[in-house]
Amino acid sequence: MMQTKNWMALVGLTCAAFIFNTSEFIPIGLLTDIANDFLTTEAQAGMIISIYAFVVMLLSLPLMIVVSRFEMKKLLSTVIFVFVGFQLLSAVSTSYYMLMLSRIGVACAHAIFWSIVSPLAVRTVPEKYKSLALSMIVTGTSVAMIFGLPIGRIIGLHIGWRMTFLCIGIFAFVLMIYLMLMLPKVPSRGTFSLQKLPFLFRKSILLDFFIISFAIATSYYTGYSYIEPFLKQVAGLQDNWITVTLVIFGAMGILGSLAFSRFYNKNPYKFTDFVLLGIFGCLMLLQAAACCCLTIILLCALWGMVFTASNVVLQAETINNSPVEATSVSMSIFSGIFNLGIACGTYIGGQVCTHFSMSDIGYAGAVLAFLTFIYWNKIIKKKMKEKAVCC
């Protein structure tokens, strides 16, 4: 049975996941305004997302190794404090490069946060509630799509995109105080050195999940990073309908997270088949669905559900296939690889927009999504079944 303080700590961590995810993707909903303010193209403004993701990718593992010996509650508080400082810098940015610098600072905090938040949530609750803890963290990221990104967009449209970053900073500061009061002390499980990495990578199933994590992120963000200008320019939606679509997109992410907690353990193979084929199908049909408001909203709803479900699968299997003492490091590698996928996807989407047409971004992402499904079916699924038989 979970005590009230366990619940309150878990809710706080879920809110932290919400605010960090909101911060990472808020430029997607404000891309046009940022581009107009700094007199750049959407593709150039999209580089803010790419560079952010590249920084997380490069620094997740080295930063986690450096801080792996610190008590996790104190580490989380420090990370959020740094996050707040750079959000305030984003709010006062007067140039494209100043905004880029502030986003790099936020990315450093992000790199550590996503390495520790899932393991921290799991260790905060009793054993039988670990799946719930993990799904709540991912639900926090989905709620960011429902409320965080659209509300940030509404604030940006009405009083300027800089105020969105200021509001994120204020919310994060209040949350930091709350977590300092509610979280129990969670001791580190010891330092992790680079010499131990080869052992981690010898777990081939873990390496396979890292590979498809990169592929899924790349395929998804090839399309999603430019969803706001796509909905405006290709689907022809008005600003209010774009916001509604983004809300529905995120709301269906919660349904994807709930579907994972209900169905994944019963049949992980069919569940993963469904979500991977769903991502492929949504990307492939993106341009066709842009023919009218209803079809693009329905497609975005399904897209949000299957992607969130795939994200929970990837995190769960990363934790399940990692040694206990290396869970945080495995998650830092996952975070780095996933963000490399975000950066690559954003870059590919930008190149498609520049050299072809924005209406083609779905097709570019669909190619990699299909290859990911083949890799899962021919290699990973087979290994998982063999492992299940051995156990």
Image (spheres, helix red, strand yellow):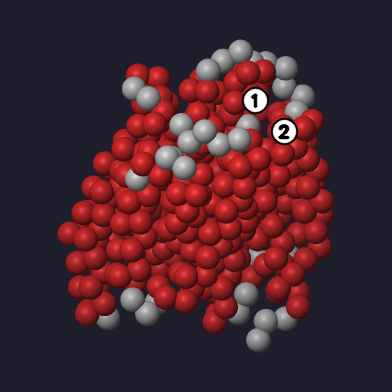
The one of 107 and 30 positioned closer to us in this rendering: 30
Q: Position of residue 300 (x, y in %)?
A: 48, 50
The one of 256 and 7 positioned closer to us in this rendering: 256
Question: Can residue 147 be seen in this snapshot?
Answer: yes
Give the residue at x 26% y 41%: 367
The one of 187 and 172 positioned closer to us in this rendering: 172
Label 2 residue SS: helix
Q: Which residue is mark 2?
A: 156
Above or below: residue 208 compared with residue 246? below
| Residue ranking furthest to the bottom | 1
Q: Residues within 10 Å of mark 2 (few under 14, many from 20)?
A: many
Q: Are dots 1 and 2 in contact, CB under 8 Å?
A: yes
Left/right of residue 54 with respect to residue 367 in the rendered view: right
Locate the N terminus and report the quarter of the image it occupies: bottom right
Q: Position of residue 122 (x, y in %)?
A: 57, 69
Give the residue at x 65% y 60%: 14
| Residue ranking furthest to the left | 378
Left/right of residue 28 with respect to residue 150 in the rendered view: left
Q: CA distance from mark 1 to mark 2?
A: 8 Å
Q: Position of residue 18 (x, y in %)?
A: 65, 53
Q: Which mark is residue 33?
A: 1
Question: Can residue 62 be seen in this snapshot?
Answer: no
Above or below: residue 58 compared with residue 171? above
Left/right of residue 95 with respect to residue 217 in the rendered view: right
**The disc labelled 2 sits on which kind of residue?**
Gly
